[in-house]
């Protein structure tokens, strides 16, 4: 499953059916799960989309399911459905990285809007991850000496200083600099620094 999907996890069949109908009428692909355990048994790291998770369920609670997902490295945005008395728990979940929570009874439009924001956040996460992979692949093409020169360039040092510190000629530094820019697909030290913030960020 690589297409984005909204996963509804709730032990109340009537709520699952209502939410599934709501999302499908708004053009949001979704899948329902009767328990946290069922979802965790099926979950795959490659899944994209978001999760709508009831905070209170029979068996494994929504919070326990969320904690397990975090431990597994799941990065899907999670929206908790809460009752009034569950708000403190939901706030605690936000501090752990939950995307948002919505209180019952909720407005259908508000929930769909939250889900659309969560799906957009997941798309941005995927885009950022792809960017990091591209930068890492470019760095992997650099030789050890080119990496050393690149670090000096990023530190803002002039070619002459780099040559002195690495005990190489200015011409060699210039050659390394040119190859680094070519391999990293940048035109200046400023562009190189901006590119590297993608990785280090």
Image (cartoon, helix red, strand yellow):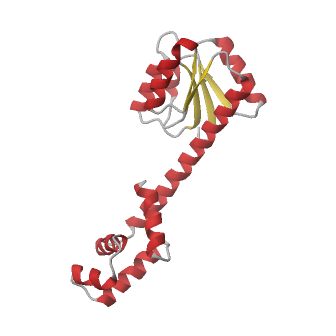
Q: Residue at x 57, y 48 (%)?
A: 124
Say which residue appears at 62% left-offset and 42% top-offset: 120
The number of callouts visible is 0
Q: Is residue 3 left or right of residue 137?
A: right
Q: Is residue 41 above or below residue 122?
A: above
Residue 18 placement (x, y as % from top left)? 72, 18
Drawn side of residue 91 relative to residue 4, left or right: left
In the rendered image, the quadrant that contains the N terminus is top right
In this rendered view, identify the residue nearer to me: 20 or 52.
52
Q: Residue at x 52, y 54 (%)?
A: 130
Q: Quadrant of residue 78?
A: top right
Name the spot of residue 169 as percent of width and height, x first: 27, 89
Q: Is residue 37 visible?
A: no
In this rendering, does residue 65 appear at all? Answer: yes
Q: Tell me residue 96's x, y (percent).
A: 43, 31
From the top left corner, tell me how far across and down residue 42 is, in percent.
51, 27
14 shown above or below 178: above
Q: Is residue 192 above or below residue 179?
A: above
User: Which residue is the extreme one toward the right?
Assistant: 25
Tell me if 111 is positioned left or right of 153 in this view: right
- Residue 189, by quadrant, is bottom left
Residue 172 is left or right of residue 10, and the answer is left
Identify the residue shown where x is 53% and y is 36%: 76
């Amino acid at each position: 499953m690589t297409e984005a999907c909204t996963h509804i996890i709730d032990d109340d069949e009537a709520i699952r059916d209502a939410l599934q109908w709501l999302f499908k009428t708004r053009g949001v692909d979704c899948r329902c799960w009767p328990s946290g355990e069922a979802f965790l048994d099926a979950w795959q790291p490659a899944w994209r989309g978001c999760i709508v998770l009831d905070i209170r369920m029979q068996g494994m609670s929504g919070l326990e399911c969320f904690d397990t997902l975090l431990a597994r490295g799941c990065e899907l945005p999670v929206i908790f459905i809460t009752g009034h008395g569950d708000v403190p728990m939901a706030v605690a979940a936000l501090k752990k990285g939950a995307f948002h929570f919505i209180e019952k009874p909720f407005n259908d439009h508000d929930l769909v809007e939250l889900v659309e924001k969560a799906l957009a956040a997941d798309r941005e996460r995927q885009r950022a991850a792809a960017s990091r992979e591209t930068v890492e692949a470019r760095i992997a093409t650099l030789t050890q000496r080119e990496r050393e020169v690149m670090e000096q360039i990023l530190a803002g040092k002039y070619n002459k200083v780099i040559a002195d510190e690495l005990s190489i000629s200015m011409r060699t530094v210039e050659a390394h600099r040119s190859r680094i820019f070519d391999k990293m697909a940048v035109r200046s030290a400023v562009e190189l620094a901006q590119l590297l913030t993608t990785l280090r960020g």
